[in-house]
Image (spheres, coloured by chain):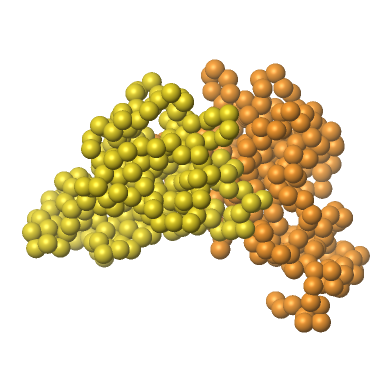
Chain colours: A orange, B yellow
């Protein structure tokens, strides 16, 4: 892939691509148009080469970023994790289990600000609680499906929630929230395919950082730790 | 490298290697004999093929594991990290800066039990405080120096310490402990070579998990996150 020298900045490249993407969408080659611009770059922090409609990125194998949050409660008998079930009418992965709050990372907003915004929209978490949001790292993976290739990355956040807080979805994207004992979450991630594929990774990272998964109880501990940070 | 079919278990392989290592040490080819057996295996949790004297492992490029702990204090004005200075008479890296507590991972003890033991020996941390020790993951790296090649891995732990606790070294391996503001630690890791090489990695992992280093303030955020989990 090479950049045309006739298109030498972010604006001209983005403008040249827009009608091409619109034509592909009109021909049915891009599903689920979101009207949301993603920055195109190799690494977060690079100056974006151009912006591209979110739904088009996998078609071109363009890397996308997301923000995911594990909301948890510390009880006397251990950790509990809030598990979301995606709305049945969501275009992608309807009805699957999800992290408490998650979203794509569009152009023009920082990851933490984006995460804060999603916490309000998806779970109705008040600002005073969201202020405790803790950035904890990032994951990288590559996923291929009928939409194309996603060599994507996720910025991960933890949020410890008061025992008396109950999330309430504001934007219709979540069917329900349930508070699960952490061991039940771990078992479902290990034994099933009920969570949206990349949410599993965010939970495994949480399980490792909170010593639910340890070298003492998991023969594949090293492979799991390294597997969450794939890619160049 | 192949295993002799005449030596078909842990005991016979370890026994066959021992006199070879002793001869190498007598010839001056293995420095700093520790009299400490390391398990030889590709991944933690594999049945060890044999055991090998710690000081001999880099000569053979044999993977070793260690346990490192970041001891921190939460004050109103932010996080503080306990920084150790290695004793001047330590055979390796004398006088260099170090994590609060760290040690090699020998054969016959689990990582967490080993870390607990080191916390008592190196910093005099009482059992009631060590009980809060938090496993947070693992790092992998490869280091080459005059001793050989170290394709090693580190199990990482966090320990939040009370503001009124002061560590006291028990085994003569630490010259002093100092409590540094986390930003001073971050600056020293970024700008200098004062920390023992692998302790830098353990601190960078801490800085990422505690959102001192964030996508918003570090252009190399992604490279740092992935760089801490190198190796197959």
B150 or B52, nearer to the observer: B150
The quadrant holding residue A28 is: bottom right
B14, A171: nearer the viewer:
A171
Q: In this view, does B101 lie to the left or right of B76?
A: left
Q: Position of residue A14 (x, y in %)?
A: 83, 68
**Residue A59: horizontal and vertical position, in percent?**
75, 65
Q: Residue A124 at what x, y percent from top left?
A: 79, 30
The one of B221 and B168 positioned closer to us in this rendering? B168
Q: Residue at x 66, y 58 (%)?
A: A44
For residue A1, say whether it is visible. yes
Q: In this view, does A57 lie above or below B120?
A: below
Q: Quadrant of the N terminus of chain B?
A: bottom left
Compared with A5, B25 (above or below) is above
Query: Vertical placement of B183 versus B114: above or below?
Result: below
Looking at the rendered image, the quarter that the C terminus of chain B falls into is: bottom left
Residue B132, x across and y down, in percent: 44, 26
Give the left or right position of residue A61, taking residue A229 as reference: right
Q: In which quarter of the image is residue A51?
A: bottom right
Residue at (70% x, 33% y) in the render = A131
Residue at the (49%, 36%) spot, across then down:
B80
x 59%, y 50%: residue: A139
User: How many marks overall?
Assistant: 0
Compare residues B80 and A85 and report the one nearer the observer.
B80
Residue furthest out toward the bottom? A5
Residue A180 visible in rendering: no
A58 lies left or right of B104: right
């Amino acid at each position: 892939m090479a950049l045309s020298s006739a298109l030498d900045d972010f604006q001209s490249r983005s403008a040249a691509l827009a009608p091409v993407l619109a034509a592909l969408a009109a021909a049915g080659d891009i599903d689920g148009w979101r009207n949301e611009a993603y920055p195109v770059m190799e690494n977060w922090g690079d100056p974006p080469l151009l912006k591209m409609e979110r739904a088009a990125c996998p078609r071109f194998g363009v890397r996308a970023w997301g923000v995911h949050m594990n909301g948890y409660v510390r009880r006397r008998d251990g950790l509990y994790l809030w598990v979301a079930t995606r709305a049945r009418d969501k275009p992608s992965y309807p009805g699957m289990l999800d992290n408490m709050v998650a979203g794509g990372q569009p152009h023009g907003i920082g990851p933490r600000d984006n995460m804060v915004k999603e916490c309000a929209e998806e779970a109705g978490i008040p600002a005073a609680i969201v202020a405790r949001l803790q950035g904890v790292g990032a994951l990288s993976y590559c996923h291929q499906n009928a939409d194309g290739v996603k060599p994507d990355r996720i910025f991960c956040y933890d949020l410890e929630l008061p025992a008396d807080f109950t999330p309430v979805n504001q934007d219709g994207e979540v069917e329900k929230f349930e508070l699960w004992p952490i061991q039940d979450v771990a078992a479902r991630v290990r034994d099933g395919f009920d969570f949206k594929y990349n949410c599993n990774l965010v939970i495994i990272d949480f399980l490792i950082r909170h010593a639910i998964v340890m070298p003492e109880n998991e023969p594949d501990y090293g492979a799991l730790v390294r597997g969450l940070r794939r890619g160049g």
